[in-house]
Amino acid sequence: MSDKTEIRERVSKDYARAVTAQTGGGGACCGGAPAQKGVVAKLAGYSDAELTALPPEAVVNSFGCGNPLAFSSVKEGQTVLDLGSGAGIDLLLAARKVGPAGRVIGVDMTDEMIAKANENIAASKLQNVVVRKGIIEELPVDTASVDWVISNCVINLSPEKPRVFGEIARVLKSGGTMIVSDIVAENLPPEVLKSPILHSSCVAGAISEKDYIAGLEAAGLVDVEVLDRLAYDSNQLESFIGSELADLKEAPGCCGSSARGGDWAKKWASNLTGKIWSMKVKARKP
Ligand SMILES: C[S@@+](CC[C@H](N)C(=O)[O-])C[C@H]1O[C@@H](n2cnc3c(N)ncnc32)[C@H](O)[C@@H]1O
């Protein structure tokens, strides 16, 4: 098994645990702050109107770091592909935008996330959304078949980002657009880069804006532009890191380490403030 496969398996296991954790149900690590599942949607920039129109299980199981569709001009009848669609928050929002004549496809590698997304799609009575099991490094999607690629806090988790950027360029139609919300980082301390927990929490795998843009351009995408940035203060960062992985009781290295202490999210948040932020980046296939 390659390191890359191991990283994906670890990430998938952590998100399976996060989505099956009881909502607000004492999933706190080592008796620290209570699990904060659901806070992410509020930080991410969804409007109250968007959130109240969604099944509650889609909102509490949102693990994104932005609202990529808010920066798009998706139209009725178009096809939208969501990379790492999770429990489906952006799939449901996209499905309403494209309407019955359009199509929305989610791709995710985690069975538990796909099951939750399918429950949320059924609860929303939408007929124009499907979720396919697969990895974003090798998308189960035809070449030049989608108008939009969106993704919300997923590409940072990939151990093979150039492959993901190449797949985005492959599946977009000519003239199609990518809008991605993702975590980017500068000067992460070496101990952060080694931490599997912080990788799954969307921190340790993050690359710089410069490398992200260079990766998209190397894949052949053009007009690459950062549309927006969300810098987290220490409290927001603590909520974000803690809520990405709500049930960490059994996570290796979580407990009993004097370097981390019980309240690990708080500790890491103060250490990382100013070093990581969320960006919305747009690119076009010529
Ligand atoms: C941080 S969550 C974001 C979920 C969703 N986009 C949202 O905004 O709620 C990351 C999701 O991406 C999936 N994922 C991570 N790496 C992946 C990969 N290489 N291929 C496919 N899915 C992946 C995980 O299973 C998980 O559902």
Image (tube, grey):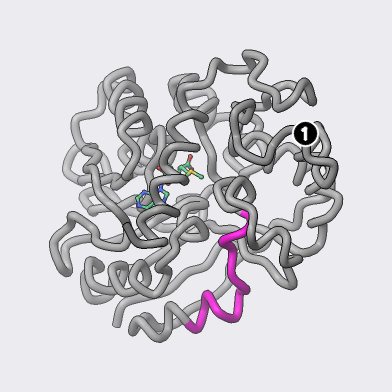
In the current view of this chain or complex, which residue is farthest to the left?
A: 142
**Residue 82, percent across and down?**
34, 50
**Residue 188, percent across and down?**
72, 66
Q: Which residue is mark 1?
A: 256
Q: Check the image and report above or below for 58 versus 227.
A: above
Depth check, front residue: 283 or 197: 197
Magenta residues (range)? 203-214
Q: Residue at x 50, y 84 (%)?
A: 214
Q: Residue at x 81, y 62 (%)?
A: 274
Depth check, front residue: 96 or 129: 129
Q: SS class of the residue under badge 1?
A: loop
Depth check, front residue: 235 or 206: 206
Q: Residue at x 31, y 77 (%)?
A: 285
Question: Is residue 38 visible in the rendered structure shown here?
Answer: no
- What kind of residue is marked 1? Gly
Asked whether mark 1 lies closer than 8 Å to ligand 1, one says no
Q: Residue at x 75, y 46 (%)?
A: 237
Q: Check the image and report above or below for 268 versus 209.
A: above
Q: Quadrant of residue 271?
A: bottom right
